[in-house]
Image (cartoon, rainbow, N blue to C red):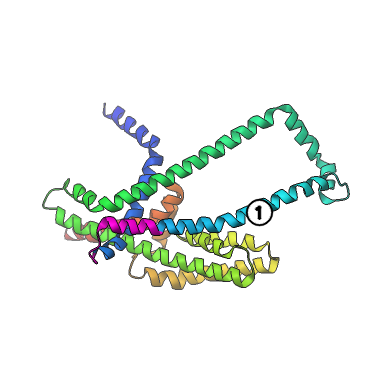
Amino acid sequence: MGFLAAYALGRALLQTAQILTLVLLALFAAVSLEPVVAALRRRRMPRGLIVMVVVLVAVALTALFVALVIPPVGKEVDQLTVRIPVWLQELRDHNSQLGRLEDRYHVIEKVQQQLSSGDLGTKLASGVLGAGRVLLGLFTGVFIVVTLTVYFMIGLPAIKAFVLRLLPATRRPRVEALTDQVIRQVGRYMLANVATSALAGVATTLWAWATGIPYGTLLGFFVAIMDLIPIIGSTIGGIVVSLVALTVSWPVAIATALFYVGFRFAEDHVTTPLTMRYVVRLHPVATMVAVLIGGALLGIVGALVAVPVATAVSLVLDEVVFPARDRA
């Protein structure tokens, strides 16, 4: 009976893994914003009003990001509709590059065969349905995370009090103090991480404006978001910006890559140590191992929450486990 119960519980956890990941992400976001809420609470603002202000700021930033994304996407779509007739004409011109490719690979003939076979419509329909399911799942996940984050932010004191009631009365004060310390550490880490990410976004925008790379503000937003992911985020952002710089020229792309190498060196040895000096007391090796394990288990979400979780574990070890072992 015990084996069957454990097996059923394991199956249930596997089936609800995606939902549990969203719940974990929402709880992490609420805990990360708790220092902001606590600071405003000290000004005697109602908790509900504070949460509403935080939500409005998040909505404003999201709207700004979308407003930056729509113009370049619309421009690229317009250019694509203009270029398609030109490409079709070049395919029939045997002296052009596209025409020589058509003579070699017979692209038009293969497309006509696909259209006449009747399989293309089925493949397109399945592809559209698959993309629709992905988008629907993405929007659903974002909606769940945002909704749960708001509820967690409002009810975090009640949730903490409920969990503490499960413990013996003699241990509650110690556990409550340790819980508050963990929440403060996680919140401070996220605020410091947001500060360094904002600096990376501003540096990217200024570099793009100085070198003529298109969509500088949008790339700055992208790099700031990616920089929230420890260790690998800024590297991915720098690669993307360097690839966009290829649309300007090869020298600009190479200079952009060198700029991000220098920026990453400065971030690792100057910016991050200064911002994290009083926040995270982890060895760099422990940080890297935590990020790798978190990314392997939960993907981007795991890499994002890995360092705060490792910080909380380190705090529990320093405050509870090691003193108990020393007394023993």
Q: How many marks?
A: 1
244 sits left or right of 168 in the view? right
Measuring from the top left, give residue 217's x and y in whole percent.
55, 64
- Quadrant of res 108: top right
316 in the magenta segment: no
Where is residue 234? Give x, y as percent: 51, 62
Residue 54 vs residue 21, the one in the foreground = 54
Whether residue 130 is visible here, answered yes or no, is yes
Question: What residue is pinned by disc 1?
Answer: 76
Image x and y of residue 55, in percent: 37, 55
**Image quadrant for the N terminus?**
top left
Left or right of 10, for residue 155: left
Q: Residue at x 56, y 39 (%)?
A: 131
Extreme-right residue of the structure = 95
Residue depicted at 22% across the width and 58% down the height: 178
Dot 1, how many residues are within 10 Å of its Cα: few (below 14), some (14-19), or many (20+)? few
Which region is colored magenta?
42-57
Residue 155 as seen in the image, left or right of residue 23: left
Name the one closer to the observer, 236 or 80: 80
Looking at the image, residue 236 sits to the left or right of residue 308; the answer is: right
Q: Residue at x 68, y 61 (%)?
A: 247
Say whether residue 293 is visible: no
Closer to the camera in the image, 288 or 34: 34
* Residue drawn at point x = 81 percent, y = 48 percent: 98
Q: The disc labelled 1 sits on which kind of residue? A: Glu
The quadrant in which residue 215 appears is: bottom right
Q: Magenta stretch containing residue 51, yes or no?
A: yes
Where disc 1 sits, the SS reads helix
The majority secondary structure of the magenta stretch comes to helix
